[in-house]
Image (cartoon, rainbow, N blue to C red):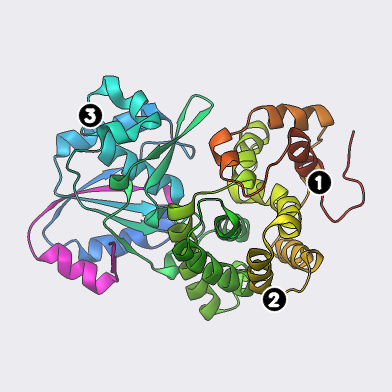
Amino acid sequence: MQQQYDWIELSQYLKDSQKRIFIVTGKASFKLSGAESRIHEIAGNNELIFFNDFTPNPQLKDIEKGVLAFQKANPDLLISIGGGSTLDVAKSINFLSKLPEKDHLEALSNAKKFEENFYINHIAIPTTFGTGSESTSFATVYVGAKKYSLKARSCLPSGYLLDPQLGLSASPYIKACCGMDALCQAIESFWAKDATEESRAFAKKAIVILMEDLKGFVQGISENAIQNVARGSNLAGKAINISKTTAPHAISYGITQKFGIKHGQAVFLTLPYFLMQNLNQLPHKIAQKLLYCFKSNTPEEAVSKLIELANKIGLQSNLCDIVDLSAKDAHELADDINLERLANHPIIISHQDIVESILGSVLKENGPQK
């Protein structure tokens, strides 16, 4: 069970005894978000050791630099402050620090083999709201262009702090991409094969909140929306921590790698296609519950509402509107898909389904083909 903190509670926890605290942060975001000043305000007499030497899509070699710094510091507490990648780096450092370097690569694929170690407490503080990484037990790590998901119970932070104000310094586009990632996570979690009643309850709340408040958060016009999107992102993280994600996330990684498109935007590009497909093929009871989340009566209405929201916050619904896309590109992307996530998709999808989802909008009669 994770502990949720506010700044007063975290301050009290840090002041209870003198600690060596290893803090993994983003670079510019740490200061711009206001997190740096908040941490120094509550640090008390604790010794703070900072680490931020990693890329936006963290490589194993970056994390291993963090492992060496972490081992040298021998801290009593780990705090991560930043976006999803920052939180994932901290999770990875905590886990890999207990292993010899020769086992690091294997651990990315088979973390369960190394699960029996003791890990120090990790308090995660997100400065973007979308990944829900503060409430998930996995971390994304790259080795070259290959993406790994480090998955272990002990990767779940022992606690987290949600301060919506920390997310205000991000640009509207980053807010939109992060918030859309959370919404896509919640939708995928709801229909995933591995979904449970608990994960669907988290996902349902997240979908309703994010559909209602994501526009206000991105446009900065509502204090209530800011609070709600932080909560919705956290709920989406809790949902996928149980259910995991499905086809849109599986496809998105190749789109990001090939075209440099932000993750949340990349996930959304294929999600309307699969939303339409799944609403028409899922068991009636599940499909109706999902339609209810969109306050819609038909699959077409739900998809239209989703695309309308994306457009209002500055996101595209077609990859061909962002890049010069060919059918060959789509087939190459379809050939290189995370099969584990496809196995969690609720219906059987073909190679052609994946190609069509990449090539064009589900609401057009014919997707763009070149």
Q: Which residue is mark 3?
A: 99
Q: Nearer the viewer, residue 97 or 259?
A: 97
- The disc labelled 3 sits on which kind of residue? Leu
Q: Is residue 167 visible?
A: no
Secondary structure state at the residue bearing disc 2: loop
Q: Residues within 10 Å of mark 1 (few under 14, many from 20)?
A: few
Q: Is residue 93 visible?
A: yes
Query: Between marks 3 and 1, how big is the CA–CA gap?
Result: 45 Å
Would residue 317 be found to the left or right of residue 66 on screen?
right
Q: Earlier in the sequence, mark 3 or mark 1?
A: 3
- The disc labelled 1 sits on which kind of residue? Asp
| Rendering coords of residue 210 (x, y %) | 58, 69
How many dots with numbers? 3
Q: Is residue 6 magenta?
A: yes
Rendering quarter of residue 69:
top left
Q: Which residue is mark 2?
A: 295
Q: Residue at x 32, y 58 (%)?
A: 36
Rendering quarter of residue 163:
bottom left
The numbered disc on residue 321 is 1
Q: Residue at x 85, y 56 (%)?
A: 363
Q: Residue at x 35, y 60 (%)?
A: 35
Q: Earlier in the sequence, mark 3 or mark 2?
A: 3
Q: Which residues are magenta?
A: 1-28
Quarter of the image with the C terminus in it:
top right
Q: Residue at x 63, y 56 (%)?
A: 173
- Pointers 1 and 2 in contact (CB under 8 A)? no
| Rendering coords of residue 3 (x, y %) | 27, 65
| Rendering coords of residue 208 (x, y %) | 59, 73
Would residue 267 be found to the left or right of residue 369 on screen?
left
